[in-house]
Amino acid sequence: MASRLTLTLAALGLAALLQPVLPQTALADPPRAVVELFTSQGCSSCPPADALLVEYSRQPDIIALSLPVNYWDYLGWKDTLAHVAFTERQKAYAHGRSDRQVFTPQMIVNGKKSCIGSDRAQIEKAIQYTSKGRKALPVTVNLSEQNGTVTIAVEETPDTTQREGEIWVLPVLREQTVPIERGENRGKTITYANVVRGLNRLGEWRGGAARFEVSVETARKGGDAYVVLLQSTDAEKPGVILGAAKGPGF
């Protein structure tokens, strides 16, 4: 009996060893909205919007991102998180909408609607308008990590109507607290959520099923997490967000 038991346990151990090692997958609720807050440490109107973005960052069906801009640096305090690429992205959105409105705090909802970043009612209305009653964005984006590589799988859904876009990976700092010593917010300490640290274009999507790969190192560079966006373009200007996903740990 003992020998049979030993044999059975050995067989079970071998079976366990032979089980495939599954990649780590981001199993989050599919997002229904991506909200991008263009903010500045030198903007006295921005702290309420920054606090509101922290709240949105806690909602599982929202991808909330902070993109600090640099055009208020001359007011006496140089934003420690700003990047010229975020300023350019904000201006490109304005050109794409043809309204040329660039201000802080400005929230862009699903790549389409501009809102005052501290106005919750306006933002909620924009989310409802751009999601068109859907519970998720119209294209499914799934992520997995294995052997230091992020694999991005894109799939159409019954709601898919646009079939051209670009895949972007954005490294993100989940939380950053900054004491501001000069300028309009002098003496304040502000906590920022999901601060974008880079904009990395991976390639084009032309409908159907598609896969993209990027190293985990690149996906997280400068941050501690990352998100993936599938975004339409119009004459090289950012357009509607078609799909999105949060990386593991986001």
Image (spheres, helix red, strand yellow):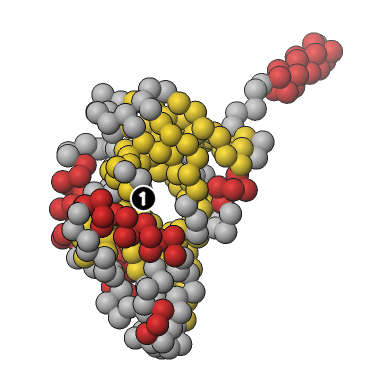
Residue 21 vertical position relative to residue 72 in the rendered view, above or below = above
Quarter containing the N terminus: top right
Left or right: 148, with 187 as reference point: right
Left or right: 230, with 136 as reference point: right
Q: Residue at x 34, y 86 (%)?
A: 184
- Closer to the camera in the image, 214 or 51: 214
Residue 158 vertical position relative to residue 25 in the rendered view, above or below = above
Rendering coords of residue 120 (x, y %): 20, 62
Left or right: 214, with 239 as reference point: right
Rendering coords of residue 156 (x, y %): 34, 26
Residue 102 vertical position relative to residue 98 in the rendered view, above or below = below
Rendering coords of residue 204 (x, y %): 43, 34
Total count of labels? 1
Q: Residue at x 71, y 19 (%)?
A: 18
Residue under pointer 1: 63
- Closer to the camera in the image, 183 or 227: 183
